[in-house]
Amino acid sequence: VQPLPDEIATVVWDGTGAPPGGRIEFFVPPFGVGNAKATPALSGLKVIQLMSAGLNRWDEFVPEGVTLCNASGVHASTTAELAVAGVLSLLRELPYFADQQRAARWSQKQAGTLHQRRVLIIGAGAIGTRAKVALEALGGDVTMLARTRRPGVYVLADLPELLPTMRVVILCVPETPSTLGLVDAAFLAALPDDSIVVNIARGSIVVTDDLINELNTGRIRALLDVFDDEPLPAGHPLWTTPNVLLTPHVASLCEGWQERAFSFLRDQVVRYVTGQPLANVVAGPR
Amino acid sequence: VQPLPDEIATVVWDGTGAPPGGRIEFFVPPFGVGNAKATPALSGLKVIQLMSAGLNRWDEFVPEGVTLCNASGVHASTTAELAVAGVLSLLRELPYFADQQRAARWSQKQAGTLHQRRVLIIGAGAIGTRAKVALEALGGDVTMLARTRRPGVYVLADLPELLPTMRVVILCVPETPSTLGLVDAAFLAALPDDSIVVNIARGSIVVTDDLINELNTGRIRALLDVFDDEPLPAGHPLWTTPNVLLTPHVASLCEGWQERAFSFLRDQVVRYVTGQPLANVVAGPR
């Protein structure tokens, strides 16, 4: 990875104590430390550059005249990869076969398959699009849903019609007022028996207690990478709920993520100092 | 699924005792019962139609004037699906996270990822091709290898040059004299540390003891769906070898396989009785 250009002066701040003094035009909050509570008082601030695709509420704290950018795309293939891994692992019952292996039992249980199975991907950004191509190559019948209706893309208002026909739902949608608590008891009840839910978006998209009820009956199975509280607290009922795979918010946190993130950041800083349009602008003046 | 046309008379034979008398032109051996030892003496035999993609040595026992067909393609997407499930599950360390979940531990271990990782698919048929598209959508850097060199497809003679650059090898190649025992100690030693081998072809492609040695050191991890002896015998060392996922030859044996197989078989029988060219001819007069 190429270093930052020499003319860029950097200051590392651990987020505790007073923010650094002097002019700080370009601010990169730490990766994966939960939701923003406020933007620190930085003199001369022009850009807040998140290293995540999710906004973690930074959009609520953008000062006047400041541009907010995310890192959509940087983690797209790795995040889609975990979603697909979860779908395939659950459909093909790899946890069941692991149990059989531990017991040294040869048991040719007929598992499910993606073949001709309907999959709803909620969130048609870089992550959802990559997951779609991978799942279609393996015979899945994929439908996309996003904020804006366009050819081949449904919207939230279509859910009552879509859900009874789906067997897999992948959540890779931003946390917004319309997606908070989207996957509740009614959403889950509309899915057919033996459906799968994968959440690699944000914990708040799912009403956890409602999902736990369905997981306990075995009607729904799930992979969850994100949670209302992270780290998932000791004693939380999810730890002992059946039919769910839990991963500790590692969808993007895998080999090489620092290099991928830094490489994007470097290019973005160069765009900033040379006056080119910034990539991944989410809110703000340019 | 549509039934066979009315004019087709069928005889079901369980393979024990004398073969049925009368004229049997079209013979469908049972699915997944191991290698052929001989072709039964059937009067008027014209076609042997396997329900598997693999030939299981039936090609060695095709009588004069008889056509051998396989069912390549019928199981392609489900078999590719298990291979991709194995690759992703191992790379993203889902077994490790399952252990953490059982211990109610939040441990953000940095797992591997397919992103920019080199994958060698040995076998460029329907299975390998589907796996390639899926893995590329998730950022993998895929190389194909087959019997015949063509643009973008390497051959066995290239292995010494290719293997040191690969991190994932998927075996979906037919069992032939040149692939028997292909994955031996030298093959495995040529792979870099922390590589993954997935075998959804035939057990005989891998020298099991050589693989077990590498699995025991942890240098290689694997998913094996096929074995020298199936069912894998009680007490076989693989049952207790670390770093391997074992599935009991279920790559194609998942929901709906009977319907997919029967639908192909019906179309093939109709082609036979109406004198059209047969699909998937592997050996024989037409």
Image: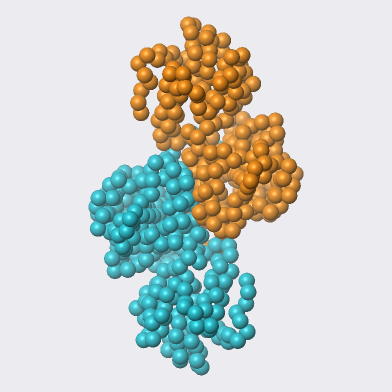
Chain colours: A cyan, B orange
Give the x, y percent position of residue B254.
45, 36
- Give the vertical position of A60 relative to A74 (above or below): below
The mark tally for this picture is 0
Image quadrant for the C terminus of chain B?
top right
Residue B6 is left or right of residue B117, and the answer is left
Give the x, y percent position of residue A89.
47, 47
When asked about the image quadrant of residue B128, the answer is top right
Which residue lies at the image location 54% right of the left edge and 35% below the top edge? Answer: B249
Which residue lies at the image location 53% right of the left edge and 83% below the top edge? Answer: A274
Of residues B63 and A159, the one drawn nearer to the viewer in this rendering: B63
Which residue lies at the image location 46% right of the left edge and 52% below the top edge? Answer: A133
- Would you say residue A103 is visible in this rendering? no
Of residues B220 and B47, the one drawn nearer to the viewer in this rendering: B47
Of residues B148 and B12, the one drawn nearer to the viewer in this rendering: B148
Give the x, y percent position of residue A269.
53, 79
Image quadrant for the N terminus of chain B?
top left
- Would you say residue B271 is visible in this rendering? yes
- Give the vertical position of A171 relative to B5 (above or below): below
Which residue occupies the extreme bottom position in the image?
Answer: A22
Residue B13 is left or right of residue B62, and the answer is left
Which residue lies at the image location 52% right of the left edge and 32% below the top edge? Answer: B72
Residue B31 is left or right of residue B236, and the answer is left
Give the x, y percent position of residue A90.
44, 47
